[in-house]
Image (spheres, coloured by chain):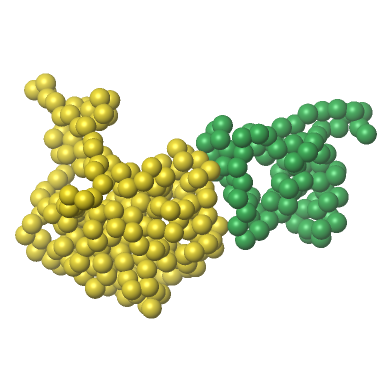
Amino acid sequence: MTVARYQLRDALYAVELDGELFVWGREREELHRLNASAARMWLGLTTWTTAETLFATLEHDGDAECDRATVVRWLEQLVALGLVDRTAGPAA
Amino acid sequence: MYAPCEVDASARAATLKLCISSDGLGYALDIRDRRVLSTPSAAELIMCAAGEIDRATVEASSLSTLMLHASAVELTVGTVVLTGSSGGGKSTVAAGLTRAGCRYVGDEVIGLGDGGDEVVANPKPLKLDGRARKALQCPFDECRDVSGERLVGGSAFGICALPGARSRPVMIVQLQFREGAPVSVTALSRGDVVEVLADQCFNFARLGPRGLDTVVHAARGCAGVRLEFGDLEQACSSILALTA
């Protein structure tokens, strides 16, 4: 069984403001605005991480906005935006 | 017409190599040996050249200055930056506030420098269309027609800042003119202010992380409002009340 893992790409610059995160992508020269839940998820992506691990972290932090499907959807959006890399490997 | 933009000999020099040529059918404009415009319209040529001069004026003050598509006026408490899309009423409200006693800081393009702590003045003549001139109800003897719009020196309305002068921003106002609409003021979150400023920067991409730091810092230090209006006097009164 393989599991998708995610990690922030290089060449990103992020600034926090009132819980939100503004991310500047140097490659595409685009500015992105992440809400507080997405910003917390962002902080968990500094190393290769699964959606399940991220969801557990957010759930532990009491983030009611996130369910498993939402976490996966956000991750795939970040991949599509060129902000996050995805790889597939065997489950731990 | 550009008298408010004159600087003394001690001011930092801005050099812009600008070449205008004509082949009998139209005009070409080269900036620093690069062709930026070919047009049959002399009016378009003049507007383009004036815009490039505006940019060079602000750029000369600092290479790290963000260039905002905005107008600005200075009050006792600090500077109010008027932003919004074209036709939103930036120039008209800046002229109205100058007439009400504020110091005219700039139009079309102003600088945001020193990490977001300073607005850099660019008090170029204001570009006013027919609707704006009617709202301002002034004779504008010193006007010059350009494509149906008129450039009016800020001194026609009141006191002007010197080009490159620095002042502290205290409020970002996103203007939206709507015919007949009552004044409506909505607070912007600091995140909204970042979006507004970044969206209205000419050189945000070039500055990258430094640009983001600048707009975030400015958002932390300024209040932000969205102001929809249909009447100039009401809009000016609202801004003055918000900054009182």
Residue B86: in sight, yes or no?
no
Which chain is drawn using green? Answer: A
Vertical placement of B131 versus B21: above or below?
A: below
Q: Is residue B159 above or below residue B218?
A: below
Instruction: Work out which residue is located at the far front of the displayed protein and give it.
Output: B10
Q: Residue B60, how many percent across, how many down?
A: 30, 44
Quarter of the image that includes the C terminus of chain B: bottom left
**Residue A9, image x, y percentages:** 68, 34
Q: Is residue A5 visible?
A: yes
Q: Residue furthest left?
A: B141
Residue B206 to residue B149: above or below: above
Please give the name of the residue rendered at 75% of the width and 31% of the height, measured from the top-left corner: A86
Q: Colour of chain B?
A: yellow
Question: Could you say which is closer to the camera, residue B84 or residue B218?
Answer: B218
Q: Does residue B52 sit above or below B131 in this rendering?
A: above
B53, B28: nearer the viewer: B53
Residue nearest the viewer, comparing B60 with A23: B60
**In terms of depth relative to the viewer, which is nearer, B109 or B228?**
B109
- Count of labels in the image: 0
- Horizontal and vertical percent for residue B78? 37, 68
In the figure, is residue B43 to the left or right of A69? left
Q: Residue at x 50, y 59 (%)?
A: B219
Residue B63 position in % (x across, y down): 38, 42
Locate residue B218 relative to residue B164 in the image: left or right: right
Q: Going 45% across and 56% down the picture, which residue do you hit?
A: B116
